[in-house]
Amino acid sequence: MSRRCEFTGKGPMSGNNVSHAKNRTRRRFLPNLQDVTLMSESLGRSFKFKISNAALRTVDHRGGLDAFFAKSKDAELSADALKLKKEIAKATAAA
């Protein structure tokens, strides 16, 4: 699995280590990814994701997984998350 957030698309960035003598060497800035289990209220099931800490805070701020997917853009989501978003949308439309 790649080091990429499934909800926001955040991935590794590159930059420089700069020493006191201003020597520059390349380095990578990795996102703060966490393995989390989130519960969907409309489906009544839990799902495992690898998301960034910022995305986890956004899910909590918006009021849960279902509310997060309602406001999220399709282009940012991974294939698994997009499939789940469509399932949740179908379940909420039926209810």
Image (tube, grey):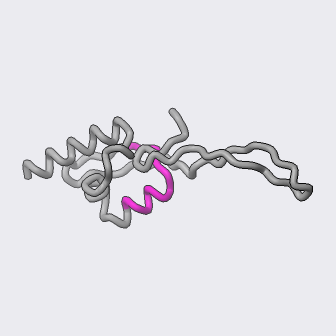
Is residue 75 covered in magenta? no
What's the residue at 18%, 48% (across, down)?
Answer: 89
Name, please, the residue furthest toward the bottom: 61
What's the residue at 39%, 43% (across, down)?
Answer: 48
Q: Nearer the viewer, residue 3 or 74?
A: 74
Q: In this view, does 20 lie to the left or right of 33?
A: right
Instruction: Report the number of numbered marks.
Output: 0
**In the rendered image of this protein, does residue 2 appear above or below residue 40?**
above
When asked about the image quadrant of residue 86, the answer is top left
Q: Position of residue 6 (x, y in %)?
A: 42, 44
**In the rendered image of this protein, does residue 53 appear above or below residue 43?**
below
Q: Position of residue 43 (x, y in %)?
A: 20, 47
Q: Where is residue 35 in the image (x, y as percent from the top left)?
A: 48, 46
What's the residue at 75%, 49% (across, down)?
Answer: 16
What's the residue at 61%, 46% (across, down)?
Answer: 13
Q: Where are the magenta residues, as a range?
A: 48-59
